Image (cartoon, rainbow, N blue to C red):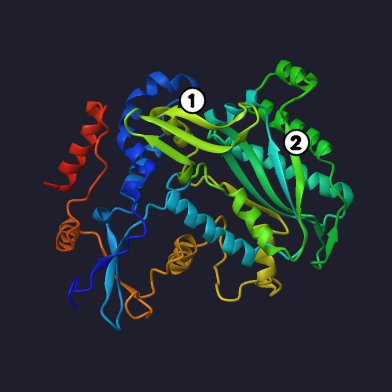
């Protein structure tokens, strides 16, 4: 079988190098690294190594030059090549969208039960927020404060230890305009499950009482970690508006799986949305549109490209940093026990996922990537456009010389990277020359 044939083509639905976000990263990231110590280090600390790793993975994502798979139709011989993805979290718009859809499908099929649920949001005052960036381990402590608050609220109604709510908790760090704003989203059953899996609904929860419990727990955790003084705690307790809040007004009743899916997607929403970015290459400025910001009284932010990149990089999680957690009836341990006893229900009809901690297994992700791309782009990449037959992946190509040979045959060489903007500094052309030297572009 030839490496490429007369029908060879490329899956053209995605061209990351043409997007405004890719151009911003490509044009300005090295300059961001250069100016970071002077411009941002004093306030935010050293630039994390993880940020550098993720950025360069993203620059390779979806670019055929950096590796690709060949998809082939045995019936008519049609084939094409699709580029590898970076699989980064909270940076690449495409990979983040796929991850969100994989997780939503899994959580709807394997975790959530068909009962009433409520969306809880826990927020903290602005004066405390940067503490959680300088020490990201405090984000896990913040999540624990929210979890413990929920358990105490439910236990006050049902003191029996066998009664547990189902909780899915998501740590978010970005505000509407990508500012550093750590807060907690929770999707919570609106009642408790007993040991026999009977559901016991609870009347409307008092969010003001929950706020007081949450506030004191946060104070205690920060004090234990020597991050806050007794004097500041005393002052904040006397403020008319402490900045702490707990919101739980959004309820989804049973048999409304579509609404539940929307909330599940929302609690793991990405840091930013690529379609809300407008990049002016001539001036190096970025306009980012969002919802109306109550404090700034506007729904957009105008930033220079360096500041925009900084806001994006703030929210890149560290390796193995767990941002989604499961507690109570929805905890991994509880689901594992029910599975062993044959009591765990499977809401899935067609898709079967493996048991996992934070997200579906890599094998499950690979197996269902075509369904997810169909959801995103309304195109099935494994359906032959010539005869409608099922296509299969027959090879993965990573050798650079072989890739170059294929792309030349398809008249796709050299790769058209974004050109430096008119006002580009030498640092921009440096990136182009580095790529040329490392990849033998000439």
Q: Position of residue 231 (x, y in %)?
A: 73, 15
Q: Position of residue 124 (x, y in %)?
A: 68, 31
Residue sticking out furthest to the bottom: 75
Q: Position of residue 114 (x, y in %)?
A: 74, 66
Q: Position of residue 299 (x, y in %)?
A: 57, 34
Q: Residue at left 55%, top 38%?
A: 290
* Foreground residue among 33 and 338: 33
Q: Which residue is mark 1?
A: 44
Badge count: 2
51 relative to 77 in the view: left or right:
right
Q: Earlier in the sequence, mark 2 or mark 1?
A: 1
* Foreground residue among 251 and 229: 251
* Foreground residue among 342 and 388: 388
Res. 338 in view: yes
Q: Is residue 351 above or below residue 389?
A: above
Q: Assign a secondary structure to mark 2.
A: helix
Q: Which quadrant would the N terminus be assigned to in this image? A: bottom left
Q: Residue at left 85%, top 60%?
A: 200
Q: Assign a secondary structure to mark 1.
A: helix
Res. 226 in view: no
Q: Which residue is mark 2?
A: 214
| Label 2 Cα neighbours within 10 Å, binned few <14 / some 14-19 / many ≥20 | many
Q: CA distance from mark 2 to mark 1?
A: 26 Å
Quadrant assignment, res 202:
bottom right
* Foreground residue among 206 and 423: 423
For the residues bearing labels 2 and 1, Cβ distance under 8 angstroms: no
- Residue 325 tag number: none
């Amino acid at each position: 079988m030839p490496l490429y044939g007369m029908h060879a083509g490329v899956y053209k639905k995605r061209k990351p190098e043409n997007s405004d976000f890719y151009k911003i990263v490509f044009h300005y990231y090295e300059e961001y690294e250069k100016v970071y110590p002077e411009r941002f280090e004093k306030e935010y600390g050293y630039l994390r190594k993880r940020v550098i790793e993720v950025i360069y993975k993203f620059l390779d994502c979806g670019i055929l030059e950096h590796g690709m798979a060949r998809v082939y139709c045995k019936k008519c011989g049609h084939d094409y090549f699709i580029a590898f993805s970076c699989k980064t979290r909270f940076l690449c718009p495409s990979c983040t969208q796929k991850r969100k859809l994989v997780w939503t499908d899994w959580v709807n099929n394997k975790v959530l039960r068909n009962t009433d649920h409520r969306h809880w949001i826990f927020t903290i005052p602005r004066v405390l927020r940067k503490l959680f960036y300088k020490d990201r381990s405090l984000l896990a402590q913040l999540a624990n404060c929210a979890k413990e608050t929920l358990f105490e609220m439910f236990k006050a109604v049902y003191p029996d230890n066998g009664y547990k709510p189902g909780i899915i908790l998501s740590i978010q760090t970005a505000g509407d305009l990508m500012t550093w704003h750590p807060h907690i989203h929770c999707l919570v059953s609106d009642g408790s499950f007993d040991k026999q899996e009977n559901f016991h609904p609870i009347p409307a929860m008092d969010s003001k009482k929950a706020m007081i419990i949450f506030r004191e727990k946060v104070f205690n955790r920060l004090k234990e970690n020597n991050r806050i003084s007794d004097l500041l705690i005393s002052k904040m307790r006397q403020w008319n508006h402490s900045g702490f809040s707990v919101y739980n007004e959004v309820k989804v009743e049973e048999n409304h799986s579509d609404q539940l899916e929307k909330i599940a997607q929302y609690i793991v929403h990405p840091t930013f949305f690529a379609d809300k970015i407008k990049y002016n290459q001539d001036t190096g400025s970025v306009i980012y549109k969002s919802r109306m910001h109550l404090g700034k009284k506007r729904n957009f932010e105008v930033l220079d490209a360096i500041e925009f990149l900084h806001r994006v990089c703030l929210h890149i999680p560290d390796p193995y940093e767990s941002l989604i957690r499961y507690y109570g009836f929805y905890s991994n341990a509880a689901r594992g026990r029910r599975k062993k006893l044959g009591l765990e229900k499977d809401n899935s009809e067609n898709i079967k996922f493996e048991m996992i901690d934070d997200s579906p297994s890599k094998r499950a992700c690979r197996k269902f990537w075509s369904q997810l791309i169909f959801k995103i782009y309304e195109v099935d990449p494994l359906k032959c456009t010539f005869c409608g037959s099922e296509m299969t992946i027959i090879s993965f190509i990573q050798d650079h010389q072989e890739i170059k040979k294929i792309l030349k045959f398809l008249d796709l060489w050299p790769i058209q990277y974004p050109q430096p903007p008119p006002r580009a500094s030498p640092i921009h052309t440096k990136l182009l020359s580095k790529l040329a030297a490392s990849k033998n572009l000439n």
